[in-house]
Image (tube, rainbow, N blue to C red):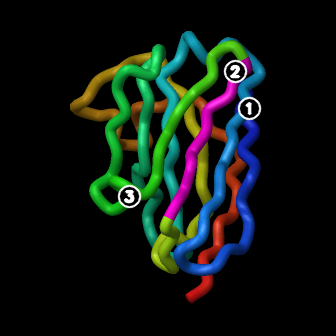
Amino acid sequence: VQLQAYGGGLVQAGGSLRLSCAASGHTFSYVMGWFRQAPGKEREFVAAISRRGGSTPYADSVKGRLSISRDNAKNTVYLQMNSLKPEDTAVYYCTAGQMWDTRVLRTPSAYEYWGQGTQVTVSS
């Protein structure tokens, strides 16, 4: 499956953005997730969503502000980002994996496919 993330940009602190990730294949077959990587830092987990959308774990740093969702009919996953903070500045990557394993789904190694990333910059 090929993943294309888009929707990033420059926004002021407190603002909102919605990222989208379009997949070439059938997303209903995959667990989907979002990670982010800031300059000089490791790639970190943001959120994941199970195949039917019933489970959506989040990183503690984004709980209550970011929301992951999916539309399997459109083969698209979304990340609604509200109340953005400067520390949310990063390249955001969407990803797809074949296994829902709560022990590892917060790690990059749990996912087989990655998009190219979209830059989100939050100014103070």
Provide the residue span drawn in magenta: 74-82
Q: Pointers 2 and 1 in contact (CB under 8 A)? A: yes
Quadrant of res 27: top right
Crowding around mark 1 (Cα neighbors within 10 Å: few <14, some 14 to 19, many 20+) is: some
Tell me, yes or no, whether the highlighted magenta stretch contains residue 18.
no
* Residue drawn where x is 68% and y is 52% of the image: 117
In the image, residue 43 sits, relative to residue 106, either above or below, namely below
Residue closest to the eye, 18 or 28: 18
Q: Rounded to the nearest whole Å, what is the CA distance between mark 3 and mark 1? A: 22 Å
Q: Position of residue 29 (x, y in %)?
A: 55, 11
Q: Quadrant of the N terminus?
A: top right
Q: Position of residue 5 (x, y in %)?
A: 72, 44
In the rendered image, which residue does mark 1 sit on? Answer: 22
Q: Position of residue 24 (x, y in %)?
A: 77, 22
In the rendered image, which residue does mark 3 sit on? Answer: 62
Quadrant of res 23: top right
Among numbered discs 3 and 1, the one appearing first in the sequence: 1
Q: Amino acid at mark 1?
A: Ala
Please name the predominant secondary structure of the magenta segment in the image: strand
The circle drawn on residue 75 is 2
Crowding around mark 3 (Cα neighbors within 10 Å: few <14, some 14 to 19, many 20+) is: some
At numbered mark 1, what does the secondary structure look like: helix, strand or loop? strand
Q: Amino acid at mark 3?
A: Val
